[in-house]
Amino acid sequence: MTNWKTCKLSDVVNLISGFAYKSSDWKESGVPVLKITNVRNGRVRLEGCSYITEKLADETINFQIKKGDLLITLTGEIGATGFYSEDFKARLNQRVGRLIPKSDVDVNLRYVAYFLESPMAREIMWSTAKGIAQANISPKEVLGLDIPLPSIDEQHKIVELLEDHLSRLDAALADVKQAKLKAAQFRRSLLQAAFTGNLDAHDSEMETELAEDWRQERFGDIFKVKYGKAIDKSLRMEFAEYPVVGSAGVMTYTKIPLTTEPTIVIGRKGNVGSIQIFKEGCYPIDTTYYMPTISDFDIDFLTFQLTSLELVKLDSSTATPSLRREDLENVQLVVPPMEEQLKIVALLESHLSRLDSMLQLGNVMEKQSAGFRRSLLQAAFTGQLTKEVGSV
């Protein structure tokens, strides 16, 4: 890091905070006002922004944003940066800052933006942040950051190298996300095929009519839907035979079950429509419905079918998510012969295990790419990135 110096961010840029507009100022259209939610991942997006009149925009001209300006969030996801890329002007709301390079200093503003994204800057900002409901950092604290500053030529080189590496990384990540999206679509179509009797023909044009030897039944005509019950604290144990089950999963254990039969537990409140199967009894609490399984169904076939129905779509509440018993009882199930159920389960397990392996690989790649991005930014601001390139 020869010829590098360390200075305060305030030595190279000024930071101007946005204006405290009132909610009564917002209009359906007009001049956009950029808020903290509009600044993410190096970009400024207009989705969800608010608008003010031209008159108010003229009155707050000092908070004008133009193309190429670098913004930073000071609340919530603190330190998120983004460049404004629109041709038309906008205004800056409170808790968002605009970073302006000082005229007497040679500094590449993109170098500053990448520095603020680096692990060293992020860690200091988050350790400095205050607030209970959400994190806050002051302009003074941002400007107090130590920034390593090489010559302007090396700043340009670092930015060039970072943009080259990160653009390729982003392209690879986009491919991974697209593959995961296609995998999710394939899963849905696979389950649809399975429960219309067309799984064998899944790769060809799929029919939507029910297979001839299958019957369709109303959920409430097959199963007796029961409400779970609250459990007394004295019955809860860390180690016991039967799981105590809420809509989000196993909470604790008990020696006294509500049911000892193989049981289906479905989320009623909170995690609506969640499906859990217990083969040896359990204690479903009052955020769930439960029902014993029946001989008409292979338990794995039933689990796959209930999952395919996406019961969360039946959520009837505008506040706490909830599933009405009437809506659950009116769900239509298909009941093929047992031999056919077992065959479908075997085919689904084969297809989905491969699909899940692909999704797991995609998750690993996303996690590794995030680590690579952090390492790349760390190398850039410790002089290692240009050193390694120079030694090649």
Image (spheres, helix red, strand yellow):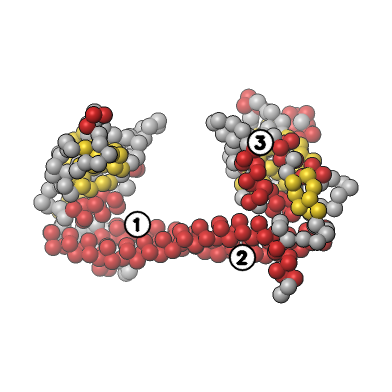
| Numbered disc 3: secondary structure | loop
Q: Residue at x 38, y 32 (%)?
A: 320
Q: CA distance from mark 3 to mark 2?
A: 32 Å
Left or right of 384: which side holds 332?
left
Q: CA distance from mark 1 to mark 2?
A: 31 Å
Q: Residue at x 15, y 53 (%)?
A: 297
Q: Tell me whether the residue at label 3 lies in contact with that at label 2, contact meaning CB atoms closer than 8 angstroms.
A: no
Give the amino acid at mark 2. Answer: Arg
Residue 15, quarter of the rendered image? top right
- Residue underneath mark 2: 168
Q: CA distance from mark 3 to mark 1?
A: 44 Å
Residue 11: x, y in percent? 82, 44
Give the amino acid at mark 3. Answer: Ile
Left or right of 82: which side holds 60?
right
Q: Tell me whether the residue at label 3 lies in contact with that at label 1, contact meaning CB atoms closer than 8 angstroms.
A: no
Q: Residue at x 32, y 64 (%)?
A: 353
Give the amino acid at mark 1. Answer: Arg
Which residue is at the front of the view, 193 or 346?
Answer: 346
The relative height of residue 303 versus residue 95 in the rendered view (above or below) is below
- Residue underneath mark 3: 137
Q: Name the residue at the bottom extreme.
A: 392
Residue 335, quarter of the rendered image? bottom left
The relative height of residue 366 versus residue 103 in the rendered view (above or below) is below
